[in-house]
Image (cartoon, rainbow, N blue to C red):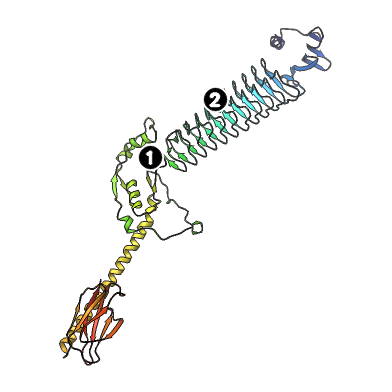
Amino acid sequence: MKLQLVFWLLLGHINLFSQSLIQNAAGTTRVQTEFAGAPNQVVFTANGAERMYLGANAAGFTRIDIWNANQCLFIGQGAGSVAVAGGSNNTALGFLSGEKITTGFENTFLGQSAGNATTIGSHNVAVGSAALFKNTSGNSNTGLGAFALNKNTTSSLNVAAGFSALTNNTTGSEQTAVGSNALNANTTGFFNTAIGRSALFANTTGNRNTAIGYAAGDLSASNSNCTFVGNDADNTLSGALSNSTALGNGARITASNQIRIGNSSVSSIGGFVNWTNVSDGRIKNNVLENVPGLAFIMQLRPVTYHLDVDAINRRINYVPAPGESLAEQKQTLQTGFIAQEVEKAANLLDYAFSGVDVPKNETDLYGLRYAEFVAPLVKAVQEQQAQLEAQQNEIDQLRSLVQQLLSARSEEAHESTNTTYIRVWPNPATSSWNVQLESVVEGASLNLYTPDGKWISASPARAGEQELNAKNLPAGAYVLQLAVPGQVPSNITLIKK
C-alpha cells in the first residue's frame, strides 16, 4: 500500500494542495507536503520521526532521501527487521536480506536472504540470492553470486565470485574463489585461491593451495601447498599431497614434493639455455669420492623404445580432450634406459644413485634423471684413463727391456766373454726366484734392476742354488744382472706376478 502511494505521488495522480495528506490517528505516521522545513518535497514520517523525502535537486532530477540516525537502509520484506541502534552504515535490499543485523556495521547485502544471519559481522558484501546466508560474525567477506559463501559463519577475509563459490565454507578464512563452484566443498580450509569454474571444487580442509583453470585441482579434498595451473591440471587420485605443482592442460601430480609439466601428448619441453642445478660447495656436507665408475656403467643397458601413452593416461587418470592428438608421442622413437634396470645395477653395488626417481605410491611412475649419469660416466673415464696409463707404462718398461736385451746380445756377439752359466726358476714367480750358478769368479755379484735401470738390490754370487726374494716387489718386469769382474754382465728378465 505504501509503495503504491509513492508511485501515485510520482505519477501525479494525487494533487497535493494541503500540508498534511494522510496520517494515523496519533499523527505519528504521515505523508506530508509543502511544509516549512521541506518546501516542494513529500515527507514521510514514521513513529514520529521523518524517514524519507521525495523531491528534486536544483537541476530538476528526482531525489529520494532516506534518513536514519545510523545511516542504514533496508528495502524488502523482512530486510533488517531485527536491526538495533548499535549497527550503522548497513544496506540491505531484498527479501529477508540482512534480517538479523544487530551491531554489525558497514555491510552491504543485495538479494533475497543475502547476509540473512549476520548479526555482529561487519564490512561484508553479499550480492546474490542467499549469498553469505549463514554468516553471523564473519568480517570483511565478499560474496558475489547466488549461494556464494552461503554457509560461512564466523570466518573472515574471504572473496567468492560465482554461483556457489565457497558455498560450503564455514570457518575457512582468507580465501579467494572466482568462478562457478570454485572451492565449492571447502569447509575449514584456509589461504586457498581458486580461479576458474570448479577450481579446487572438492577441497574441504586443504590449505594454501592455488588453482587456476577450468576444474584445476578439483579432485582432492585435503591437499596442502599445491599449485595447479591449466585446464584440468590435477592429482591422479583424491589422496592428500603436499608441495606439488601441476602445470599445463591435463598435467598430473602423482606424489608430494613433485612438479609435473604438461600431459602425455607433449612432445617437446625446452628453452634457449640448459637447466641450472644449484651446486655450491658452501652448502654441501659429507662430500665423499665414492662414486662407482666402470663397475656401474658396464651394467647399464642402453635401449630404444616407444612410450605406451595410453597406459600412462590410464595410470594417471587422464582422459585426453577431444581433438588432442597422441600420434606424435606414440610414434617417436626414444633412447634411454629402463629405470628398474638402473635401480638394480645401483643396488648391486650398494650405490645410492640419485638418478632413479622411485615411485612414492601405487599410482606413481618410475623416472630417470639423466643428468645424474654424468658423475659415474666421468668416474668411468677417469678409471679407464688410469688403466691406459698403467698399460702404457708397462709397455714402455717392456720396450726398454727389449732394447737392453738387444744391446746386450749385440755386445756379446763382438766381445769375448767367459760368462758363468746361470739358470732361474720359476719365472714368472709370485714370491721368490731360485737362482743356480755353475761356478763363480771371485767378486761376482747378483744385481736386481727395474727395466729402466733403477737399482733395487745386490747380493754376492755363490756357486750352486740361492733364493732371490720377490715378496715386497710390485708385479711387473725386472732385470737380474750377473756382474763378473772383467766380463760383460749377463742379464736375465724376471717377471713378478
Quarter-of-image position of residue 438? bottom left
Q: Could you tell which of marks 1 and 2 lies nearer the N-terminus? A: 2
Residue at image point 29% right, 74% down = 471
Q: Secondary structure at mark 2?
A: loop
Residue 175 position, x and y percent, is 58, 33
Q: Could you classify mark 1 by the number of other residues whose Cα lies within 10 Å: few (under 14), some (14-19), or many (20 or more)?
A: some
Say which quadrant the N terminus sits in.
top right
Quarter-of-image position of residue 42? top right
Q: Secondary structure at mark 1?
A: loop
Q: Is residue 252 left or right of residue 181?
A: left
Q: Is residue 418 above or below residue 354?
A: below
Q: Which residue is denoted by mark 2 in the rendering?
A: 164
Residue 44 position, x and y percent, is 76, 14
Q: Is residue 354 left or right of residue 53?
A: left
Q: Which residue, as the protein is rendered here, is positioned at the far right? A: 36
Q: Is residue 385 above or below residue 470?
A: above
Q: CA distance from mark 1 to mark 2?
A: 34 Å
Say which quadrant the C terminus sits in.
bottom left
Disc marking residue 266: 1
Q: Which sits in the foreground, 372 or 458? A: 458
The residue under label 2 is which amino acid type?
Ser
